[in-house]
Amino acid sequence: MKFATLFVLGLLLATALLCEGQSQGGKTKTKSKSKNKTKPTVAPQVEKQLLLKAEPCSPAKCKLPDCRCSDATLPKPKFKGKEQEIPQFVTITFDDAVNAVNYAQYELLFNGLVNPDGCPATGTFFVSHEYTDYVRVNALYNAGHEIALHSVTHGDGTDYWREADVETIEREFGAQLQMLEAFAKVDPKRVHGMRLPFLQISGNNSFEAIKNLGLTYDSSWPTQQHKSPAMWPYTLDFLSIQDCQIGPCPDAALPGVWVNPMVTWTDTEGYSCSMIDACAYPPADDVDALFEWMLENFNRHYKGNRAPFGMYLHAAWFSRGRNYFGAFKKFMQHLTTYPDVYMTSVSRMLEYVRKPVLGRPFKSCEKTPNTTCQPVHCNVQKISTAEARYMSVCDKCPTVYPWLNNPLGQDM
Ligand SMILES: *[C@@H]1O[C@H](CO)[C@@H](O)[C@H](O)[C@H]1NC(C)=O
Ligand SMILES: *[C@@H]1O[C@H](CO)[C@@H](O)[C@H](O)[C@H]1NC(C)=O
Ligand SMILES: *[C@@H]1O[C@H](CO)[C@@H](O)[C@H](O)[C@H]1NC(C)=O
Ligand SMILES: [Zn+2]
């Protein structure tokens, strides 16, 4: 080996390692197998880690079903003038732990409600781990609702999530996915979306994690500026025009990752709220007042560009007043009287957005899973705090309380 060759190889190697170190702010994944005299194989790894900056979207370059510009105010440009024929989707979502109490409410809300195509009305549940009753999650799953991810720990405030790197997010949501599979019999292939706790995204990282986890969409990003006309879901192949309310927001190109923007509601004082329970000035605790307020927010979508109408909340909202639950139920029942309003999960709605049509959105109903769950009730210890935790799961108790570093709760 000539000196010159060695020198050049050494230089290449040094440059390659340096680049890798810079690309992730010091987090060097040094795989020193490149001691080999063959050409260093570092280059492709660097390429994988570097995200490209997103460019402005142009419809010519971004086409359905896998790409959608954020500024497209209709499912298809040629639907202009035919807005009243666009099916109106309503996506009802609940966050956090599923337990016996809120499960009973969810059941009462959706029970018997049918969409105009004869398929049952469904919602999306962004499930976090602690205090979740996985037997009830299984029941929601078998009833045709979408089970989505909301992390294991739910984090310790917004700082944790704002500063979370890709690995942290992947671990939090990946472990929750494993738990849902092991304890609620949820097929990971049917899990498509996530919502960050406190709606706190962390720039590109959250969306890179979505891609790495094999998910399709995020639904954590509120918009106040795009509520009339309301924003439709879009992909991050190109730069988003969405207003960044809780930053940092992504500006890298992340092909194929969908954003389901949380189009805000307006409360009685005119303030925007990303979730119903975040509205500072809701109406009085009165069924009619609450109902009329929901209808007003709904009509901004229904009488406008028919962008999906999100009803995002936590079950705890029902305890705010005597009439909250009744008003919500009344409103859902009212929605079933329209010939063109569909209450579906977020992922079902996205199926439509990818292949939009006028009139009836789907040819057939979704196939519901048919899993069997033998409920078992477990009393296990949470290792980090030595507290006892009761936990209902399908089929078999874990040995210890499952957590981030031990999602299956195995003996360690
Ligand atoms: C070095 O590369 C050669 C040729 O590709 C290969 O046969 C050998 O196993 C490699 N050695 C190491 C340590 O990676
Ligand atoms: C996202 O990635 C792009 C492209 O690599 C970069 O320019 C930008 O600073 C990143 N944004 C955040 C908030 O990390
Ligand atoms: C669900 O599966 C069970 C057993 O595998 C079967 O007996 C039952 O008919 C199935 N139900 C539906 C609705 O497919
Ligand atoms: Zn939450």
Image: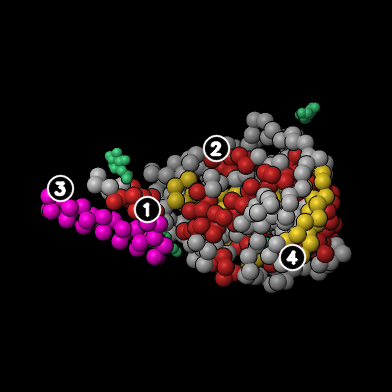
Secondary structure of the residue carrying tag 2 is loop
Q: CA distance from mark 4 to mark 1?
A: 38 Å
- Depth-wise, is mark 4 or mark 3 nearer the camera? 3
Q: Foreground residue, 58 or 255?
A: 255
Whether residue 39 is visible to the viewer of this picture, yes or no, is no
Q: Could you say which disc has been placed on residue 31 in the image?
A: 1
What residue type is disc 3 on?
Met
- Depth-wise, is mark 2 or mark 1 nearer the camera? 1
What residue type is disc 2 on?
Lys
- Depth-wise, is mark 3 or mark 1 nearer the camera? 3
Secondary structure of the residue carrying tag 4 is loop
- Residue at position x 56%, y 39% from top? 356
Report which residue position mark 4 lands on: 386
- Residue at position x 82%, y 46% from top? 376
Q: Is residue 33 left or right of residue 188?
A: left
- Residue at position x 78%, y 59% from top? 389
Residue 359: horizontal and vertical position, in percent? Answer: 63, 36
Report which residue position mark 2 lands on: 355
Q: Foreground residue, 303 or 261?
A: 261
Q: CA distance from mark 2 to mark 3?
A: 60 Å
Report which residue position mark 3 lands on: 1
Q: Is residue 396 left or right of residue 60?
A: right
The magenta region covers: 1-30
Residue 364: horizontal and vertical position, in percent? Answer: 67, 30
Q: CA distance from mark 4 to mark 2?
A: 51 Å
Secondary structure of the residue carrying tag 1 is loop
What residue type is disc 4 on?
Ala
17 is within the stretch colored magenta: yes
- CB at mark 4 closer than 8 A to ligand 4? no
The main secondary structure of the magenta stretch is: helix
Q: Foreground residue, 339 or 349?
A: 349
